[in-house]
Amino acid sequence: MYILIYNLYFILFFYINKLVIFVSILINIIVMDTILELSKNLISSVKPGFKRYLLKSIPENQRLVFIKGTRGSGKTTLLLQYLKDINDSKDRVAFLSLDDIIYTQQNVVDFVDWFYKRGGELIVLDEVHKYPEWSRTIKTIYDRYPNLKIIVTCSSALQLGKGDADLSRRSISLHLNELSLREFIEIKYGISFPVYSLNDIITKQDEISPLVLKKIKPLQAFDQYLKFGVYPFSLEGEEYYYQRLSNVVNLVLETDLPAIDNITFGTVIKLRKLLYVLAEVVPFTPNISELSDKIGVTREQLYRFLFLLEKAEIIYMLRKHAKGMSMMAKPEKIYLHNPNLAEALTHNKTNTGTLRETFFINQLSSNYEVNYSSQGDFLINNQYVFELGGRNKGKKQVKDVENSYIVKDGIEHGTGEIVPLWLFGFLY
C-alpha cells in the first residue's frame, strides 16, 4: 500500500513539475510576444513628418550607439522614426522602453536572446539609465550577440565610463540638442531651410538672409521661439507649455539624476533650491562662498550640484577655457540652458539681454566651443569674438579685436561685421 502511494506521489510530482515547466515556458513566450507587439505598436504609431537633424547622423556600421540628450528633446520619437524608416515584415527591429513596468519582472537579456534567435538585427533600448545595472546589461548583449546592432537613449547626464562596465571604448555617443530656430520654423510653419555653418553665417549672410526673408518673417518666428519653441512638445499647444516644461525639470531632478548619480531626496531638494536661486539672477557671476551659504551646502557640494545641473542640461556654465570643464572649475557666468527654461522658471521676467545671450549659447554650443571672452561676450572655437546687443549696439568694445563681430537683435539684415541674432538659429 505504501509503495503504491509512493509511486502515485512520484508520478503526480513528475507531471506537476512538467506542467509547471510547460506553463513557465508558455508564459515566457507570451511575455516575449507582448514585448515585441508593444514595439510594433510604438513604431507603427509614429506619424510621418518633421524629423530631427540628428537622424541623418546615426551611423550604419557602428554596433553600439548612444543617443544622449535632455528630457523632452525628442530622442524617443527620433529613434521610432529611424526604426520605421528601415523596418520591414521580417520583425528584425525592436524598441524597448525600459521605464515600462514590464521590465521590473522581465530580464532584458532574456528578451534579446529570444529576439536574436528569431532573426533580430537591431534593438533600441530607450531610457536605459532607468534599468538596474544598465552598463553590465549592455556589455553582456554586446559581447554575446556580435551581429546585433544596439542603439541606446539616455539622459545627457549619463557618464558612459561610470557604470559597472566601461562602454566608452565600445560605443560612439551622439548628442541631440533642443530644437534649433530652423527646426522650430519647419515644425511651426512647414518651411524647410538648409543648415548653415558658422563660417557661412559670418561670410555669406548677404546671400542667406534674403533667401529666408522670401519665405518667412524671421523676427516674428524668433520671438515665438524664445517663448515656446525649444521643445518638440510645443506642437501640442502653448497653453500648458510652461507647466509641461516645469514637469520636465522636476522629472530630471527627481528621477533621472537619482537613477544616474544615486543622489538622495534631500539632495534633490537642495538642487531645486539652487536652480530657483540661479533662475532669479542669471546670467550669474558666481560667488561660490555666498551661494553655498545661501543653499546651505559646502563649497565642494555646491560645485558638485552645479556640475550635475550642467550635465543634465538645465544650466550652462560659461568658462574661460574648455579645459576648465572639471567639476571643481569655477565658471565665469552661469546661464539657464535655453531661453524657454529662462522664461518658465522666472515666470516671464527674464530680461531681453539674458534671453539673447542664452539663445546664442544654446545654438552655438551644439557644434562649437563656446567660452568666456574678456574682450567681447563670447569666444567661439578660440577664433571668433562676438558681442551681443540690440539694434543700436555699437562696436566700441571690440573695435580693435581681430575676427570680432557684432550680433544684433531686432534686425532682419546684417552687413559685414554686423550679423542678425536670429541667423545663428540655422546652425543645425
Image (tube, rainbow, N blue to C red):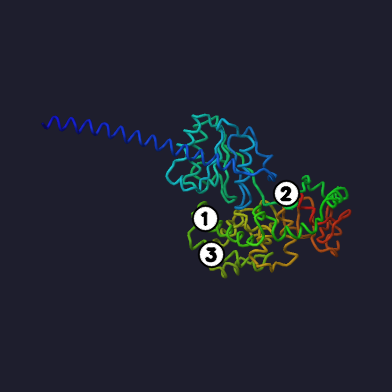
Kindly identify the residue that appears in the image at 78 percent across and 44 percent down: 194
Question: Residue 151 sits in which quadrant?
Answer: top right
Q: Residues within 10 Å of mark 3 (few under 14, many from 20)?
A: some
> Residue 406: x and y, percent?
83, 58
Q: Are marks 1 and 3 in contact (CB under 8 Å)?
A: no
Kindly report the distance in space between the C-alpha atoms of the residues bearing marks 1 and 3. Answer: 15 Å
Residue 381 can be seen, yes or no: no
Amino acid type, label 3:
Lys
SS under mark 1 = helix
Kindly identify the residue that appears in the image at 57 percent across and 59 percent down: 247
Amino acid type, label 1:
Thr
From this view, report whether residue 375 is shown above or below residue 45: below
> Which residue in the structure is indicated by mark 1?
255
> Which residue is more in the foreground, 5 or 422?
5
Q: Residues within 10 Å of mark 1 (few under 14, many from 20)?
A: some
> Which residue in the structure is indicated by mark 3?
270
Q: Earlier in the sequence, mark 1 or mark 3?
A: 1
> Residue 360: x and y, percent?
74, 56
Q: Quadrant of the N terminus?
A: top left
Report whether 189 appears left or right of 95.
right
Q: Earlier in the sequence, mark 2 or mark 1?
A: 1
Report whether 158 appears left or right of 340.
left
Amino acid type, label 2:
Tyr
Question: Residue 241 sits in which quadrant?
Answer: bottom right
Which label sits on residue 368? 2
Kindly report the distance in space between the C-alpha atoms of the residues bearing marks 2 and 3. Answer: 32 Å
